[in-house]
C-alpha cells in the first residue's frame, strides 16, 4: 500500500525524466520515483510496478504502490510516483578493490540467480552493471540486491513497450533471452575484472593473466554463448569455478 504520508522526503538524483527521492515514515525507508505524466514514462513505471510487486525474492526490493496524483510538499502539481523499499547495503564499485576473484564469482553467481528468477517471471533485466548492485554481506550466496528496473523488458505484461529498453552493454541483438543474460553476465564479470585491475597499482592485467582455466573458459563461453547453453547451465559453470 502506498504510504499515506512521509516524515522525511529528500531529493536524491535525476535520471532522464524521473526524479528520485529518499523518503521515510515511522515504519520504513523508501525510494520514490516521480515524473510528470509523460505516457512512455508512465508505462515504464507501471510496468515496473506490475511486474515486480507480485514477486518475492531476497535480492529484490519490495514495492509499496503506484500513484498518478502524488504531490510533493509545497506543490500542487500531480506527479506519477512509484514507491519502493530503500534497501541497505554498499554499492558494489566501492567494494571491488578489496574483493578477491572468488568474491567476484560469488557475486556473479548470486546475480545470475536473481536474473534467472526474473526471467522465469517474465522480466528480462537489461541494465546490469556494477553500480546497480548493493552488497549486503559476503557471508552467503544471496548477498546482492538488484537495483533500477525501469526500462527493462517486461515481456509477459507488455511485449511491445512504448519506451526504449535500456542496455548496459552492447549485447548481440540476435541472442534469445537466456543467451542474452549469459552474455550480459559475462560482460558484467569483464567490467568487475577491469575495475579490479584499475584499482591495483602497477599490476595492469595481472588479474586477467592469472585467471584459473575454469574462469577463462567461463569468459570465453559467455562472450558468444551457444544456443544450446541454458542460463542454469551457465550458472553451474560459475559455481564450479568458485570451488
Image: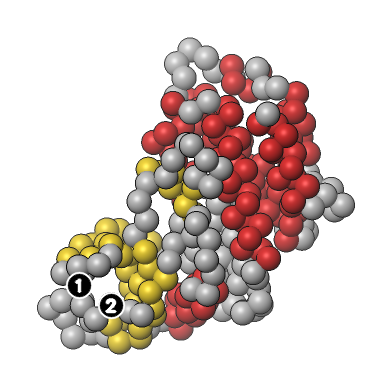
Quarter-of-image position of residue 242:
top right
Q: Give 100 or 79, whichever is nearer the viewer.
A: 100
The disc at residue 225 is none
Q: Give 28 or 100, whichever is nearer the viewer.
A: 28
* Image position, residue 52 (x, y; %): 52, 70
The disc at residue 6 is 1
Residue situated furthest right in the rendering: 228
Asked whether, in this view, residue 59 is left or right of residue 176, the answer is left
Classify mark 1: helix, strand or loop: loop
User: Quadrant location of the N terminus?
Assistant: bottom left
The residue positioned 46% from the left and 19% from the top of the image is 200
Asked whether, in this view, residue 125 is left or right of residue 145, the answer is right
On screen, residue 103 above or below 85: above
Residue 35 in sight here: no
* Image position, residue 229 (x, y; %): 82, 49
Are the residues at dot 2 and dot 1 in contact (C-beta closer than 8 Å)? yes
Classify mark 2: helix, strand or loop: loop
The residue positioned 28% from the left and 62% from the top of the image is 29
Quarter-of-image position of residue 106:
top right
* Image position, residue 220 (x, y; %): 76, 35
Residue 152 in sight here: yes
Amino acid at each position: 500500500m502506498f504510504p499515506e504520508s512521509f516524515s522525511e522526503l529528500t531529493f536524491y538524483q535525476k535520471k532522464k525524466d524521473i526524479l528520485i527521492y529518499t523518503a521515510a515514515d515511522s515504519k520504513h525507508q523508501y525510494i520514490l520515483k516521480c515524473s510528470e505524466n509523460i505516457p512512455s514514462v508512465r508505462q515504464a513505471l507501471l510496468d515496473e510496478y506490475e511486474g515486480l510487486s507480485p514477486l518475492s525474492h531476497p535480492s529484490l526490493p519490495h514495492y509499496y504502490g503506484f500513484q498518478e496524483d502524488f504531490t510533493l510538499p509545497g506543490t500542487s502539481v500531480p506527479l506519477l510516483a512509484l514507491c519502493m523499499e530503500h534497501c541497505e547495503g554498499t554499492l558494489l564499485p566501492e567494494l571491488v578493490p578489496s574483493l578477491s576473484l572468488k568474491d567476484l564469482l560469488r557475486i556473479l553467481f548470486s546475480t545470475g540467480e536473481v536474473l534467472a528468477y526474473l526471467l522465469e517471471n517474465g522480466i528480462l533485466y537489461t541494465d546490469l552493471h556494477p553500480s546497480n548492485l548493493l552488497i549486503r554481506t559476503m557471508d552467503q550466496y544471496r548477498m546482492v540486491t538488484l537495483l533500477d528496473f525501469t526500462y527493462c523488458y517486461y515481456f509477459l505484461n507488455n511485449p511491445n513497450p512504448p519506451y526504449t529498453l535500456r542496455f548496459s552493454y552492447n549485447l548481440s541483438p540476435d541472442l534469445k533471452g537466456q543467451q542474452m543474460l549469459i552474455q550480459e553476465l559475462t560482460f558484467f564479470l569483464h567490467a568487475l575484472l577491469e575495475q579490479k585491475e584499475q584499482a591495483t597499482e602497477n599490476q595492469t592485467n595481472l588479474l586477467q593473466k592469472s585467471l584459473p582455466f575454469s574462469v577463462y573458459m567461463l569468459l570465453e563461453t559467455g562472450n558468444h554463448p551457444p544456443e544450446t547453453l541454458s542460463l542454469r547451465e551457465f550458472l553451474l559453470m560459475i559455481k564450479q569455478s568458485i570451488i
